[in-house]
Image (spheres, helix red, strand yellow):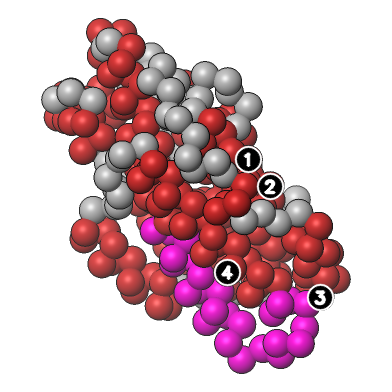
Amino acid sequence: MSITHDRRHESRPVKAGDRQETAARLLASAARKSYDPLVEVDWDAPIPDDLYGMTPEWCSLYGTDLWDSMTEQQRVTLTKHEAASIAGTGIWFEMILMQMLLRDIYSHDPSTPHVQFALTEIADECRHSTMFARSAARFGVPSYQPRGWIRQSARVFKATATGSLAYGGTLFAEEILDMMQRDFMKDDRVQPITRTVSRIHVLEEARHIRFAREETVRRAANVSRFARARIRLLLGITAYFVVTSLVNPKAYAAAGLDPKQAQAAARANKHYHARIREGSAKTVEFLDDVGLIGGPSRQLLRRAHII
């Protein structure tokens, strides 16, 4: 996706509904369709040896010569470990999101639908993080996380990010995972646990995405030119580290591959780059429309193959 006009949001305005009305509708939706993964997922079901951990076309090596040279069992193993790595990155950012949400609503009236939905979303994210961690454990896969220095650096972001920066950054993490899981949950080549976990997450995450999008629109509407430039840059940095942290190099070693060779193949993999752009396209278009993509951040987005 090419971003050529930094001021596109002026000609393509994006509107948000009334904050309390939107939250009330989302609360009603949560009351109708919420899931307890400890009950909904059959954690005791056998793990078939011949099913992938995720849709193989989303694997970072799919389409490479290295992928073609791998045995089918190596491919199955790698997709299990990459699925767990993606989930680990999801847990990391969900923890960040929960703290940002709590800070955002801290001084608001808890009797309002807006605050009550934010608390509902936090409860959802607690269950999602537990679900992701348990699915990796069920596969016998380590709890992969982003590199230590990235996690430590993110402490500043989670402690200070507010407004459209917090909600816009959330969209980069939520929507690419949503795009992946929409494929996972429909793919009968994929492990049943992955499919059920993906279905639960997609159904509940739709509410979170709606909430984050509308808050992003509201918060971005009246920011100063300087603040907008700062938000653009920090969003670019956030998106870069979210996307480049999806696959932990240890996943390659677990499949019997040389991690350096596999990382080089993944970095040059045009198929994977196209998948990342596909998964990020809705977020990029939306944030561009509200004026939050532009300036130096575009270079970071290109380096991560987001645009």
Q: Which residue is mark 4?
A: 122
At x 68%, y 47%, the residue is 203
Along the polypeptide, which appears first: circle 4 or circle 3?
A: 3
Q: Secondary structure at mark 3?
A: helix
* Numbered tag placed on residue 64 in the rendering: none
Residue 151 location in percent, x, y? Answer: 29, 62
Question: Dot 3: few (<14), some (14–19), or many (≥20) neighbours within 10 Å?
Answer: some
At x 40%, y 36%, the residue is 83
Residue 1 vs residue 46, the one in the foreground:
46
Q: Is residue 10 above or below residue 281?
A: below
| Amino acid type at image mark 3 | Gln
Q: Are marks 1 and 2 in contact (CB under 8 Å)?
A: yes
| Amino acid type at image mark 1 | Arg
Q: Is residue 90 above or below residue 259?
A: below
Query: CA gap, disc 2 to disc 4?
Result: 15 Å
* Numbered tag placed on residue 203 in the rendering: 2
Q: Is residue 46 magenta?
A: no
* Numbered tag placed on residue 20 in the rendering: 3
Residue 50 location in percent, x, y? Answer: 41, 17
Q: Which residue is mark 1?
A: 199
Left/right placement of residue 107 relative to residue 262 reads right
Residue 223 vs residue 19, the one in the foreground:
19
